[in-house]
Image (tube, helix red, strand yellow):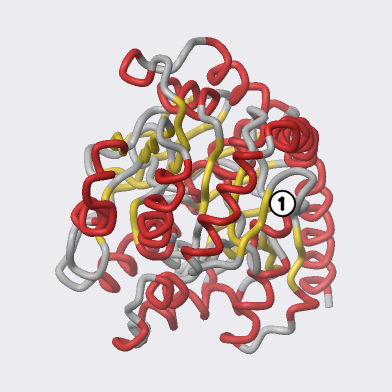
Amino acid sequence: MNICFLSQEYPPETHVGGIGTYTYNMAGALAGLGHTVHVIAATTGPKESYTDNGVVVHRVRFSKMKLKELALFHYSRAVAKKVAQINCRFDIVQSSEYGSEAFCLSFRKRYPLVTRLATPFFMIEEMNGKVFLGPRPLFNWMEKTQTLRSDSIFTSTRAMANAVADKWGIDPSGVEIIPNSVDLSRVRKLGEGKPAPDSLADEDYLLYFGRLEERKGVHVLAEALPLVFEEFPKLNAVLVGSDLGFRGTPMKDYMKGKLGSYMGRVKFYENLPHEELFPIVNSARMVVLPSLWEAFGFVCVEAMALGRPVVASSGSGFAEIIEDGISGYLVEPGKSGLLAEKMINALKDEEGLRKISEGARARSQDFEVSKVGLRLLSYYEKTKDEWLRKRKN
């Protein structure tokens, strides 16, 4: 098949979060299976096209503007133009709804358009405590319009399908569920290939990795850590990720207020490349992911692939990855006392941790990128066939 992904985020230049991770993994996997894959991604530098990992990457300039919606519209228009310019007849074009990159394309479709629900802007605003402002109407409308005008819609978890369907008036049964995926062999090669940095040598630590922000529940972890540290005097905590703050103040400052004298047992690292991150994950005693809500959670599967016991939030995408008590631990989100209790009980049970580690590694195999890629290709074929049938009628 000839496949085109639209993704502002794409390593190495614009690798921001889960959308970039997903696109990089899946584009490479599909190219490895013999398909022709193009990715249209953003750049703040010169426009260029090149081949990386078997994937043809086209960088389209993203111009920052005072009104974010206007910047997104201009970028969407540039993306639609680039799709038309590429000398390839695509069988499918795929975009996430976030940022409405396929908004303009959805009004002049030459090829079947698939929207993958990642996490819409309105959900991010609500989870970061900004619901009192309401979602920016135009931003929300552009994302919703692109999605509704798509030829098919899919997402990684039933939790995400239900959440968006309820808000946008979509029949959830019409949203296909195809889990996100991880290149397990790459994660294990990087994680097990070298030790953690000298700064963590011989340390016993819990790990959180991801953005330091409210929707990721980092403030909840801050409230739980003193209880855990009191129980385990030699245990430390490591947090890896960009500090996006907590309601107007840096997250580190909020944590300092909650941890007091325990703050000396917490180490922070900014975003790290996978070559440096995965050895830190591999050496952690436990990974804690206390998101208030999560669509899927690549970090969860990456940690499980390395056999790390994970404590994560129930009630959203994590619950469709972790089998509670078998391949990890689930705890009600937003409850620091329950989170601390879950961590303490798990850490006291060494044999239980060993079994969870084995279960996590086994469960991660269900999210191997090549396996999920075959499911996605089947979905593409079905979407293309339906698109062609409608065009004939």
Q: How many marks?
A: 1
- Where's the C terminus, which quadrant? bottom right
Question: Picture coordinates of residue 265 (x, y %)?
Answer: 31, 36
Q: Position of residue 260 (x, y in %)?
A: 22, 51
Which amino acid type is marked by label 1? Answer: Ile
| Left or right placement of residue 88 versus residue 366 in this view | left
Q: Is residue 44 above or below residue 274?
A: below
Residue at (39% x, 28% y) in the render: 273
Task: Choose top left, top right, bottom left or bottom right for residue 369.
Answer: top right
The residue lying at 44 percent from left, 62 percent from top is: 101
Secondary structure beneath disc 1? loop
The image quadrant of residue 13 is top left
The residue that mark 1 highlights is 321
What residue appears at the point 48 percent right and 69 percent down from the top-left corner?
334
x and y, in percent, of residue 90 in the image: 64, 48
Q: Is residue 27 above or below residue 385?
A: above
Mark yes or no: residue 83 visible: yes
Could you tell me which quadrant the N terminus lies in?
top right
Quick check: 73 above or below 142? above
On the image, the x and y values in percent for residue 56 come to: 51, 32
84 or 138, which is in the foreground? 138
